[in-house]
Image (cartoon, rainbow, N blue to C red):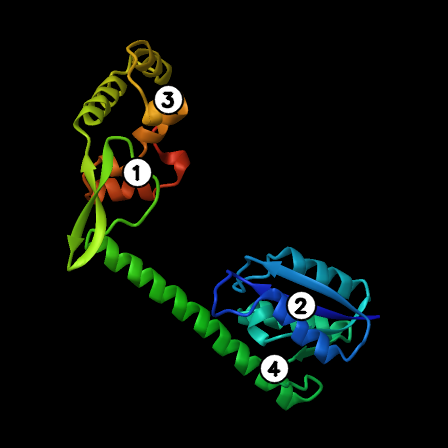
Amino acid sequence: MYDALYARQSIEKKDSISVESQLEYCRYEAHGEACIEYADRGFSGKDTNRPGFENMMNDIRAGKIKRVIVYKLDRISRSILDFANMMEIFQKHRVEFVSSTEKFDTSTPIGRAMLNICIVFAQLERETIQKRVTDAYYSRCKRGFYMGGRIPYGYRLTNTVIDNIRTSMYEEVPAESEQLKLIYSMYADTDNSLGDIVRYLNEHRIKNLRGASWNTARISEILRNPVYVEADIDVYRFFSKPRREHLQLGK
């Protein structure tokens, strides 16, 4: 049987410990015992949908693992429910759990209780970070900051200053706006299909972004894009519906 050394890093940052460094800590804790290394790069700890983690759990169920070693508790899980389920499997297969920087004795009730308390705070930290990021995006959107992403047809980016912060904003491209009006007016005519609109635009040499020809997928994307409509409660309700309830765009 082997020791399982597990490491996870959601994103690579200068102030975060690398997978290689985590495994080095785990090797030291293994004290030369035979081990198998599992790693997940670019995966969050919010759930267990991670290939390295799943491979390790399969080996545990197969009876190959006697002990799991991690650099820190939150490297393996930041969810109370996932951690509880994981520990149940560990106990069923008599697998020990070791954190190389946080000393837990899972053979005692106190040790298991302390472990559960730590995972509660790990989940709290994750949810706090998520809330802070969401609030920051919402605040920036409300103030009109450019939030990234592909620039929609009919607009271009222009530099601006909002609340003494340099940012960007959408600026209308008059020529493209006229083509948008044409697309919507043609689609409003029930005699026209998406294919009819595409043929008209291409026959009249009206170019898409980057000078490309039009296709039905691009037209459909434009017709469904909420950036082209004035926001109100009806629009909100429309885009909140499941996709199957939306208007059938492909005639």
**Disc 4 crowd, CA 10 A, few/some/many (<14, 14-19, 20+):** few
Q: Residue at x 16, y 27 (%)?
A: 174
Nearer-N-terminus badge (1/3): 1
Residue 248 visible? The answer is no
Residue located farthest toward the right when viewing the structure as drawn: 1
Q: Is residue 247 left or right of residue 234?
A: right
Residue 215: % across, % down: 39, 20
Q: Residue at x 71, y 58 (%)?
A: 55
Q: Are marks 1 and 4 in contact (CB under 8 Å)?
A: no
For disc 1, the marked residue is 151
Residue 98, quarter of the rendered image: bottom right
CA–CA distance between discs 1 and 3?
16 Å
For disc 4, the marked residue is 101
Q: Are marks 4 and 2 in contact (CB under 8 Å)?
A: no
Nearer-N-terminus badge (4/3): 4
Mark toward the viewer: 2 or 3: 3
Residue located farthest toward the front when viewing the structure as drawn: 14
- Name the kind of residue labelled 1 in the image: Ile
**Disc 3 crowd, CA 10 A, few/some/many (<14, 14-19, 20+):** few
For disc 2, the marked residue is 6
Nearer-N-terminus badge (1/4): 4
CA–CA distance between discs 4 and 2?
14 Å
Q: Which mark is residue 212?
A: 3
Q: Is residue 126 above or below residue 160?
A: below
Nearer-N-terminus badge (2/3): 2
Task: Check the picture and name the quadrant holding the N terminus.
Answer: bottom right
CA–CA distance between discs 1 and 4?
46 Å
Q: Residue at x 20, y 51 (%)?
A: 144
